[in-house]
Amino acid sequence: MRRKWNVLVIGLLVCLLASSTVLAKTKITYWTGWGGDELEDLKVVIEDFHKANPDIEVETTTIFGAYEKLLTAIAGGRGPDVVSAIWASQLAGLAHHGALQPLDKYIEASDVVSPDDFFPAIWKSFTYQGHVWALGATTNTNFEAYNKDFFREAGLDPETPPKNLTEFEDVIRKLTKWDANGELTRLGYLPGGLLKLGFVFGGEWLNEDTGEITADHPRNVAALEWLGDFWAEYGVDNLQNFTAGFGNYWSPNNPFMVGKLAIQSYGEWIEQFQTRYNPSLDYGLFATPAPEGGRENVTTFGGSVFAIPVGTKKADAAWRFVEWITGPEGQKKLAKVFVNMPPRVEVARDPELLEAVPILQFGLGLLEGPNAFGDYVPVPVWEQYLAEMGRAEEAVTRGVAKADEALKEVRATIEREYQKIQ
Amino acid sequence: MLQLKKKHRDLATGLAFISPWIIGFLAFVLYPLVASFYYSFTQFNILRPPRWIGLEGYAELLFEDPLFWISIKNTLYMLVFGLPLSLIVSLLLAVLLNQDIRFKAFFRTLFYLPSIIPAVASAMLWLWIFNPQYGLINSVLAAVGIRGPGWLVDPRWSKPAFIIMGLWGVGGSMVIYLAGLQGIPEQLYEAAEIDGASWMQQFTKITLPMLSPTILFNLIMGTISMLQYFTAPYIMTRGVGTNVPPGSPLNSTLFYSVLLFQNAFAYFKMGYASAMAWILFVLIMIATLVLFRSSARWVYYEGQ
């Protein structure tokens, strides 16, 4: 008789427990920008979140390559509860347009998230006008990678990469090869990317105190002039035709991996590239060399961030997922599977992680220095700013515009656009 | 009375049967059309409610935005040089394939084939054909001792490259010409032959006049699609540098719709993009009207 009661009570308890967890389970939709293999890796990490938080179920959907969807979905009231298919560079615009919920109140109440846990420059990239709009779980730094065999071949010391811009120019010349017809067969380096180069030269793109657009800062102009001189030295037609033969950066035909470039800009992913595309490649790393009056050891960092769009009714559950995945455990796991730099200082310095992913060491040094910048300018019209910078860079390198005039025009256009949306 | 009732019922049944189309038309064509007209007078970023700015957007396009005029110029270039060329080539192909030649069906299929390849796939293909170093065209040129141009990376050659690529896809208008050619009565040619007309005379005095309605159709459709030219340049003209938006090199392939898309979906300036769309609509309407009006002078309809 007694046994029967026991069974009954236990049975009832089990039923109650089961039903309560089923009933209390909150399903949240999460849109990610990661696709392919990375999406599978991500799902494995999310399983760990499920184990630790049985009352929440994250439904992961990739919108890789279709990022425009997000804004229209949010506008239509059909946005996700959490999104990471956005980048820190977009936060100013998204916040300005009212697409995201500020995370301040969650962060204040949280034991896991505190501004001091993150690299200061990276934490700043989560904020816009005094509010926190997103948190990052991963980031990337960048630097130059060089082919040591080519250094040896050119009579350069493979353990001493160039330290300043003059040395760099000289090394590029020595590594560049031409055939008998005067055609390029290998290029030492293809400089480009005006944003970072402006920082390297000592410039700035926005005066954060006054809110003034400073595209035509004299040091930015100097950077663009340097790019123009480089193209003029090697020949616009030569560079155009040679670089048009480059394979896609993200492919086995990457020009550095196949030896068409002796030096190329990379982030932490160079390790995966080498393993996959050219295991015998012997390479070294160095920070982009600066001219006199410029900044040493500059790196720009970027990466997708986790945010909670407006319109979701499950913001609390969404926050718990954001808190976990950008927390120490989530970051460490993602850093390992993606070979990405963790934005948290303690995680990035974790000896176990550095041993498992040694490539992180180099970028860590740059991030700890004073010259780490977000790979964007925190203004709501950043996309257009970037496009206009690209146009200016193209015009000057092809020899059809002068650096100072081109950048003045960029400034005028962006100021006008910026004003319009105020 | 009874008849009226039946009439009503028939109408209701009829409407019910075409309701999928009516609903689709109202929701996905008419409503967006009207909405975009309204948005064209506003500043609208999708998320915040549109803000009325009147004609400011139009004024900015016409008087302030240098890219607007660059894109108009590029698009007109394609219209003036690209379209006539492709109309002529497709007409000549159709005439050739209308002859009694061997493997006629095979050749017709062959020339039509490119038109059924998805635009994105053929764009990827042509990226390689135009590659200055490894591309098919420059390899052939190199074999005869000519150093080919940079094509898509050279602002002097980027638009001609798109015209060449367009010629590859003339199969669609060729088929329409072929159908038109089949409709020309054989006895006209027979009579002309008896009168001693040469092939050229037959072509200019019979084929062209009899085909003129078909030519008008292809001309109008071609004009519209040239003015809306988008997919290939959008895919093929991102610069080598990471930050260069579509339209490179040096904005030489910044066509109207590419700029429109950029404003709408990269910058989320929906009001501005709507204004662009309506200007394009007016341009297309004017072009079509002009062509229709002029057609009275050169298009011959049988029985008129």
Image: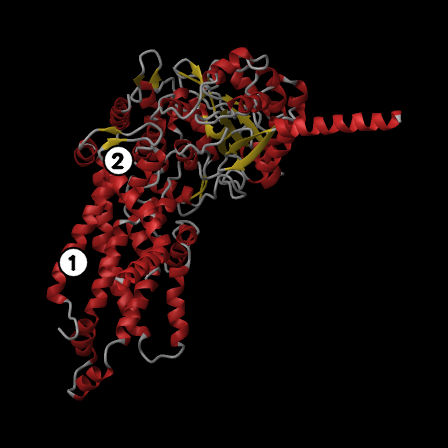
Q: Would you say A4 lies left or right of A339 here?
A: right
Type of residue at label 2? Tyr
Dividing the image into 4 quarters, which one contains the C terminus of chain B? bottom left
Chain designation of label 2: B
Question: Label 1 belongs to which residue?
Answer: B291
Which quadrant would residue A38 be assigned to in this image?
Answer: top right
- Above or below: residue B48 compared with residue B224: above
**Residue A144 in the image: x percent, y percent?**
50, 28
Dot 1: element: helix
**Residue A349 in the image: x percent, y percent?**
61, 17
Give the camera-side residue of A415 and B129.
A415
Q: Would you say B74 lies left or right of A284 here?
A: left
What residue occupies the far left of the structure in this picture?
A: B297
Closer to the observer: label 2 or label 1?
A: 2
- Above or below: residue A145 compared with residue B160: above
Give the camera-side residue of B30 and B192.
B30
**Residue A412 in the image: x percent, y percent?**
24, 24
Question: Label 2 belongs to which residue?
Answer: B39
Which quadrant would residue A199 be assigned to in this image?
Answer: top left
What residue occupies the far front of the structure in this picture?
A: B1
| Residue count near mark 1 (Cα–Cα under 10 Å), binned few <14, some 14–19, many ≥20 | some
Say which residue appears at 44% left-offset and 36% top-offset. Answer: A67
Give the camera-side residue of A58 and A18.
A18
- Above or below: residue A48 compared with residue B143: above
Chain designation of label 1: B
What residue occupies the far bottom of the structure in this picture?
A: B194
**Residue B41 in the image: x percent, y percent?**
22, 34
Q: Inspect this view and state whether residue A284 appears.
A: yes
Type of residue at label 1? Leu
Q: Mark 2 touching mark 1, by CB under 8 A?
A: no
CA separation in Å, label 2 and label 1: 30 Å
Dividing the image into 4 quarters, which one contains the N terminus of chain B? bottom left
